[in-house]
Image (tube, rainbow, N blue to C red):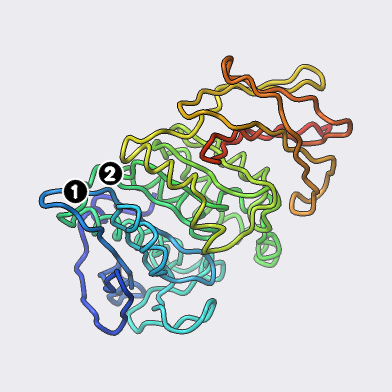
Amino acid sequence: MPWNIKTLSTAPKIFPTTEFQEEGVTAIFYEGLPYQGRPTQAFAWYGIPKLSAGQKCPAMVLVHGGGGTAFAEWVRLWVKRGYAAIAMDTCGCVPKGKYGDWQRHAAGGPAGWGGFDQVYHPITDQWTYQAVADIILAHSLIRSFPEVDPERTGITGISWGGYLTCITAGVDPRFKLAVPVYGCGFLGEDSAWLSDFKKMGPEKSAKWLGQWDPSEYLSRAAMPMLWVTGTNDFAYPMDSLQKSYRLPTGARTLCLRIRMAHGHGGPGENPEEIHAFAENILNGKAPLAKITGQGRDGMEAWVSFAAKTALAKAELNYTKDTGKWQDRKWESAPAQLDAVQGRATATLPEGTTVYYFNVIDNRDLAVSSEHVDLTPK
């Protein structure tokens, strides 16, 4: 593993700035790792909720996706929930400009995304190495704040940020939870970047994947993880997602919505399942339902569950299509819910190729079973 977690666990030096102003949050630069032999600084927004004297709060580390930067609104979302939060830029930029075209910072690290063109550079000068280091340093920084309980921290990231979250979960064991949104591993098998790997050729691709695919790190992740995505995600398809979420050793929860949109703001930041997951682990609040088993007898499928919050419904989600995951048509049908027995059942429609269940509680929070692929292998 290329990162020195002991070194990165020390809170980095802060460089205050007044150049960037947003209500309810504070802009800073903090010291990153050297890049191409020179010192670096990463930009971040952080926020702390109003607390009583001596009170400590949990904290969330927020990792943006492709084309993004540190987003103040995302920090404010978690501060309103009673959390300290920090969102850092992972591509050597500052939040000046527009989405996908942010201004570079003179002391910034490498530009994103993926670093496919950097695979033969020194490993410490490559984007994934630097980005993960910046995330861990941001975690160390917010843990050091006197208002924060360092034993109650979590991480969530969106798209490329979900990719980075997967790796970071396997590198930094101090996190008590991790929530990758969309992002997963096995990028060389089935992802939006297959054309990039083809252009790179087999040797270069194998080197990049061996260094930077999340599948190389996820088996080290032992904290509870919530995986949030959609059935037709353009970048990270369901087969790669399933291989990824089976690797960590900690408890896993899935939230798979039909045709969930891909993006920052509402789609990737606001799912209430993320909030409830954090509230349960970091604040002891009611948990999401837990899938405890699943199976099938012919065309009769079932899923079992445990829930401390009353359930509203269960649904069978299925497709009759094959081919690219992103192009498949998904449909939903009510499943029979037996809350007393903790079981939902449904008859698979003729022609079903893939299916899974969603169990939804009275907060409208969904948890999903693993998808089952019925196509002949």
Tell me which numbered mark, 2 or 1, is placed earlier along the sequence.
1
Left/right of residue 59 with respect to residue 368 in the rendered view:
left
Residue occupying the point 63% across, 33% down = 370
Q: Which residue is under mark 1? A: 56
Left/right of residue 24 with respect to residue 239 in the rendered view:
left
Q: Which quadrant, please, contains the C terminus?
A: top right
Q: Is residue 304 above or below residue 181?
A: above
Circles 2, 1 touching at the beta carbon (< 8 Å) = yes
Question: Tag 2's secondary structure?
Answer: strand
Local crowd size for mark 2, using a 10 Å CA cut-off: few (<14), some (14–19), many (≥20): many
Residue occupying the point 24% across, 42% down = 151
Q: Residue 313 in the image: x percent, y percent?
A: 63, 32
Point out the residue furthest to the left here: 53
Mark identifier at residue 39? none
Residue occupying the point 51% across, 36% down = 253
Frontmost residue, 128 versus 250: 250
Q: Which residue is under mark 2? A: 152
- The amino acid sitting under disc 1 is Lys
Frontmost residue, 286 versus 267: 286
Local crowd size for mark 1, using a 10 Å CA cut-off: few (<14), some (14–19), many (≥20): some
- The amino acid sitting under disc 2 is Arg
- CA separation, marks 2 and 1? 10 Å
Q: Residue 35 in the image: x percent, y percent?
A: 35, 72
